[in-house]
Image (cartoon, grey):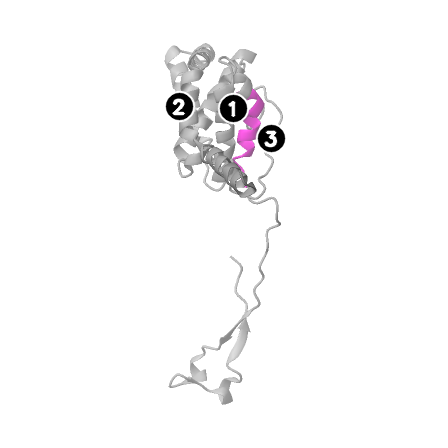
Amino acid sequence: MSKLGVAGVVAALAAGMLAGTPATAQFYFKSKDLHGDPVRGDEPGIGQPMPGATPEELRAGVVWNMRAALNVAALQCQFEPSLMTVQNYNAVLSDHKAELAKSYDTLTKYFIRTAKTKKDGQNALDQFGTRTYSGFATVAAQFGFCTTSSSIGRDALYAPRGSFGDIALMRMREVRNSLTPWGEQQFPRAQVYLPPAPLPRFDKPCWKKEIFVVEKCGQPLTAVTYAAR
């Protein structure tokens, strides 16, 4: 086989392997490093407050926060199919079904335990869920949130059953960090300064039959500075 033939075969094989590998969206040349420290669940800004919660209950809260984040990503990130946020979320629900159900039961018992009545506890649980979901809504930071959620969902696919909570504790701060818009990190943002725009005077006495009267008002163009938006 000639050298050209070998090169052609190698190129064809490489093209075939690349064609069979799903691409991952890359919105920036260099994305912001959003990793953070592991959480317990009672840190400010991580989730809805759970006063008096045990470590197990706090873990359940973080699990439910992560589930909500992946659910919101499945809804918000469909503009980029290669992120596979919908497929990841559905797979997480299936693979970690037992752990998610146990976490929900733990949360239900927590809110009933800390409320005056069972009905108050159920209402508190409903409010917890609504506020948790709304806490992941983002527009300005959509790219960072979507790529982060995609990465976490993919990791959860390969995690042993019963360990979704470990992923949630390890990466919840990363999800929260992704809700802040960062943008391109490789190149500094350019700031464009425009010089004052020269415009004619629009005083009525300066114009006669749509002709500017230099004798009355001097040169027609004068620098006008616009207020910055």
**Residue ID for mark 2:** 90
**Earlier residue among tags 3 and 2:** 3
Q: Nearer the viewer, residue 192 or 217?
A: 192
Q: Nearer the viewer, residue 182 or 211?
A: 182
Q: Position of residue 202 (x, y in %)?
A: 45, 77
Q: Amino acid at mark 3?
A: His
- The quadrant where residue 45 appears: top right
**Residue ID for mark 1:** 155
Q: Position of residue 99 (x, y in %)?
A: 46, 13
From this view, report whether residue 149 is shown above or below residue 32.
above
Res 137 visible = no
Is residue 180 rendered magenta in the image? Answer: yes
Which numbered disc covers residue 35? 3
Q: Main secondary structure of the magenta part?
A: helix
Q: Amino acid at mark 2?
A: Asn
Check whether the beta carbons of the residues at disc 1 and disc 2 lie within 8 A of each other. Answer: no
Which residue is at 42% across, 21% downward? Answer: 91
Which residue is at 56% across, 69% downward? Answer: 196
What segment is highlighted magenta in the picture?
168-181
Q: Amino acid at mark 1?
A: Asp
Distance of mark 1 from mark 2, alpha carbons?
14 Å
